[in-house]
Image (tube, helix red, strand yellow):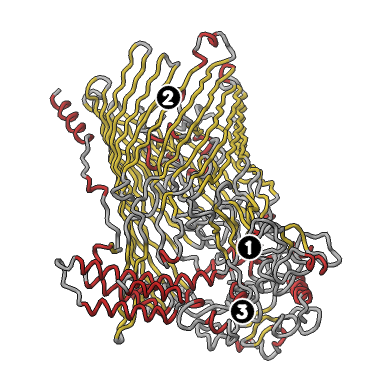
Amino acid sequence: MVTGYSSQKVKDLTGSVAVVNVNQMKQQPAASPVEALQGKATGVQVVSDGAPGATPQIRIRGFSTINNNDPLYVVDGVPYEGKLSWLSSSDIESLQVLKDASSASIYGARANNGVVIITTKKGIKGPPRVTFDAYYGTQVPQRNRFPEMMNPTQYADYLFQSFKNAGITPGTSETTGSNYGTGTTPTLPDYLVAGSKTGQNITAADIDPAKYNYSRESGTFYQITQANKAGTNWFKEITQNAPIQNYNLSVNGGGENATYAISGGYMGQQGIVKHTGYERYNVRSNTTFNLFDGHFRFGENMQYSYEQFYGVGVNPNVSGDYQGEGSALGFSYRIPTIIPVYDIMGNFAGSRGDKLGNAQNPLAMLYRAKDNVQKRNFFFGNVFAEVDIIKGLTAKTSFGLRYENYSGMSIGYPNLEFSEGSNANSLSENSGFNKDWTWTNTLTYKLNRDKHALTVLLGTEAYDYRGRSLTGGRNEFFLLGNLDYYYLSRGSANISNNSTGGTNSLYSWFGRVDYAYGDKYLLSATVRRDGSSNFGPSNKYGTFPAGSVAWRLSEEPFLADATWLEDLKLRAGYGITGNQRIPGFQYLQRFESALASSAYPIRGDVITGVWQNAYANPNVKWEELKSLNVGLDFTLAQGMFDGAIDWYTRKTSDMLYPVPLPSQASGEGSAPFVNIGDMQNKGFEIGLNYHYGTDSKSDFGLDAGVNFSRNVNEVVNLAPSVKQQVYGNFRSLSTTILKPGQPFGSFYGYKVIGIYQDAAEVAAGPSYDRARVGGLKYRDISGPEGKPDGKIDPNDRTIIGNPHPDFLYSFSLNLRYRNFDLSAFFNGSQGNDLYEATRYFTDFSTFDGSASTRMLDAWSPTNKGSKTPSPYRGASDFEYASSSYYVQDGSYFRMKNLQIGYNFQMDKVLGGRVKNLRVYGSATNLFTITNYTGLDPEVSQTNSTFSALGVDFGIYPVGRQYLIGITAGF
Amino acid sequence: MKTKHLFSILLISALSGGCSGDFLERVPQGELVTDQLATPEGVEGLLVGAYGLLNGNVNGTWGNYSSGPSQWLFGEVAADNAHKGSNNGDQPNMNQIELYQVTSTNDNLEVMWNRQFEGIARCNNVLRMVATVQAGSGKNSPMPARWKSRAKQECCADTITFSSAGSLTKCLTSMKH
């Protein structure tokens, strides 16, 4: 088992390391191998994203920092940061998660958020063994979770009521427009738009199909759209059942002095949101060679994969990046249900018409983006050489390389059926490369004498990154929709081009000592000194020490007689790790010359000047995390029970984040990252396993496991100049606050205490400007002096929710009976809040659009018990400002995976040529129990300078998967 | 035996550093640092950049609402010469301006003040760079004195045109140098 540049036996670990059962992990189909890590290790929270090839969000022991919380991956000894979808799970031999500083600090500078160590399959001596793995299945959207929107009749009533409640007469052209008639109760139109006529103003002559012209010119565009009186279920229209498949062939073997492991595979996953998908081809070769009687060993591990991501929301780099009101899912919440998908001639219909809002037709958007593709060629590998200098002393060198070449294109089409549409058509292309190499040199000395076992490791590591990317775009192509025609040189307008790049480097020295006495007393100490190009001359280097001890109580005389006890180990560790993942050059004042930002016309020519776009903090330095971990590992009753309990505390100090400077200091330039603020995470983890019938002789075997993790996060303090920071801006909402004494990502807004029941209650106060009967009533928390002041204003905003779970839990069950096997896996999260930002569109009369069926139970004088505000056109801004109305309980319990398999006895079949054959069927995400009203309770954080956690703008939902698979060995 | 020792020596020497201090020194890509602008060309570039903000718009279209010569929001809409338009729920912060019910969280206020201070920041950068170039004018071609006073006058004058008293004070102060 590999930890920190060397190997250790699992039972000798002194730090907190979760060894993941890779076979159990592989049972869950996913493009990215770490997706299946969910629930398999205590202290690891994985938030899935339903998009094909997506990056799941992984957090080890909570959120350690304000900036990047992703862990470091080490694949065959080469560190890697980023998305792991290029690695096929079939290639993984073992996976460990280093959770505490004493195990992770050997990786020093990049280990604040934990380290995931992945080792790929290596060759084993013997004749070639061929394995073929395949599965095929279908993903089904969880249709029972689709939000319910009002049908056109209900919406028309709701709309009229919103005007009446505001004292405005509906049915006029300024209020409800031409769609619903001129009376006091609404009637539905037959047609929404016919040319320039709308709604109930359309006459029979207008809908003459001969007039129809879906032209590319807005002047001649004449669309005829029928109203869909039954109501369009947009969520149903944009989703589909989608296939998923994976094939892998590997051959593994070796001789006396060489071993090899070669594999190749294909994975294809279409998205449950239409016109999205992912494909991957990969090939791998791992070899080792021995020379000079085995004193000199060398070899390589390398792989190449080609990935293709197409459609909307399938972003190659960052989870959650596609979210927002302008995404296909966001539009599905906003577009009126009276609009059909297609018009009378089968072209896309849209919000063109009268007072139909400004949402795009989401299916049109997905369809037009179906050819938008991002391709990625990914090469990752290392070559290494090891020599035994004298007995016990080994020197090793390893050179790892990541070379990634990507390209993509994105095509824009006219969308004149959209109320804010245009007839512009465009093409934009991008391509670039990312290259980084890591060169590690280590010297290891092992000494075993009597009961003493000592290992000393010294090493250096250098890392260099370079990247560059180019984009270009043009508008106005003669031919639309023809992929053979789309080259930038064929566009005739809006010529634009851009290129950008980056570079950074790291250099480190490290040392480690492991000492064990009689397998009873274990000690480990590491120190690492890292330098990063991200910091200036004053703070370039950081030193990260760690130490841990362990005591194997079960070897002690006083416990030697306890037959019920196999192994009992108490361990404690303390260490410091660092973080330097910020944009580079924060220590320098930077200026740029940009046409869009600093140009001025002089004598008829536009001259581009220079402006300061980034300010400097010359003293920017390493962020540090100090962590203490105490744990107990035990194995009882001849291996029937085993488990681990850990308690930890982690304190991050000098967090790197860009404190917004006051305008006088920086104007529009970006503020530099500064080291301010402390964050703390405390918690404990319990993992318990039960095994029965583990020897292969018995017919029946059972393995059951339970994992429980609790983490409490708190922002301890911020800079003296920053008392708090409100962020997470979405329209007029600011959802989140960064405040000392509160968890990171706390939701912020007004606290709803009820609905104003009558005019007297509004007048009695405390209330806000233009408060009204049937509107939300807020708690008066404070005024400028900090005491309730009888009126509601921005001082009355408070903490309204916590996106972190109280605890995470999972259960796993593996049964074996003769040749059958069954495994079931459940996981859940309890106590996390979610901010359902989509309610901004569905629960308030903010935009012409759509409304949730929740509003059918809205407050009215005859329905005074309701907690939902009544429809009211032109309500005060305070009503849809950020408040606890948006905050929902996001706890869930999910049956994550169920698999049933059968092992065929192959010795008598086919002359023994097939060594083993297993067939299985599995189902993923079978059921979810939750009270959350949104699409899916797993909401990745959006990508912004400060991460707004748990805010749902319309996420790509996770579907159910049903598949059958086969594994054959030859 | 000998080959083995050779290998070991090579590896140990590879271990012992192989890295010069330059390895960790990198240069911003596509961006300029202060030293690269300490020339007359740099000063002129910064001056053009300062003029470039006269339209109140740094990048994109957002700044056009709440700053800039048209002053649509704070000028025309507040004066009832223009309506904000669209739906009630669209841009509620603009509703506040139109209704004279502005709260401290109104983002248009932040944008307007930000633009003004950015204008002053750009002028100050020009003045700072002029001083730097003049101080080190042995190396580069000397900057004409008239450039310096012209920069101050024009810069200050234009700043006064579209901003408030605060910036005027700052501008006048810098003129003393």
Q: Which residue is mark 2?
A: A9
Residue B31 versus residue A213: which sits nearer the camera?
A: B31
Q: Residue at x 73, y 65 (%)?
A: A767
Q: Residue furthest bottom?
A: A205
Q: Residue furthest right?
A: A862
Q: Are marks 2 and 3 on the same chain?
A: no
Q: Which residue is mark 1?
A: A794
Under tag 1, what secondary structure? Answer: helix
Q: Are marks 1 and 3 on the same chain?
A: no
Q: Residues within 10 Å of mark 3 (few under 14, many from 20)?
A: many
Disc 2 chain ID = A
Q: Residue at x 21, y 33 (%)?
A: B11
Disc 1 chain ID = A
Q: Residue at x 46, y 76 (%)?
A: B165
Q: Does residue A581 appear to the left or right of A146 in the view shown?
A: left
Reply above or below: A907 against A447. Answer: below
Reply above or below: A758 against A170. Answer: above
Residue A147 versus residue A126: which sits nearer the camera?
A: A147
Under tag 2, what secondary structure? Answer: loop
Q: Residues within 10 Å of mark 2 (few under 14, many from 20)?
A: few
**Is the N terminus of chain B in the top left, top right, bottom left or bottom right quadrant?**
top left
The Cα–Cα distance between marks 1 and 2, rounded to whole angstroms, is 58 Å
Looking at the picture, how far across and down is residue A729, in whole percent?
55, 62
Which mark is nearer the camera, 1 or 2? 1
The amino acid type of the residue labelled 3 equals Glu
Q: Which mark identifies residue B98?
A: 3
The amino acid type of the residue labelled 2 equals Lys
Q: Do the CB atoms of the residues marked 2 and 3 lie less than 8 Å apart? A: no
Reply above or below: A319 against A847. Answer: above
Looking at the picture, how far across and down is residue A275, in whole percent?
53, 62
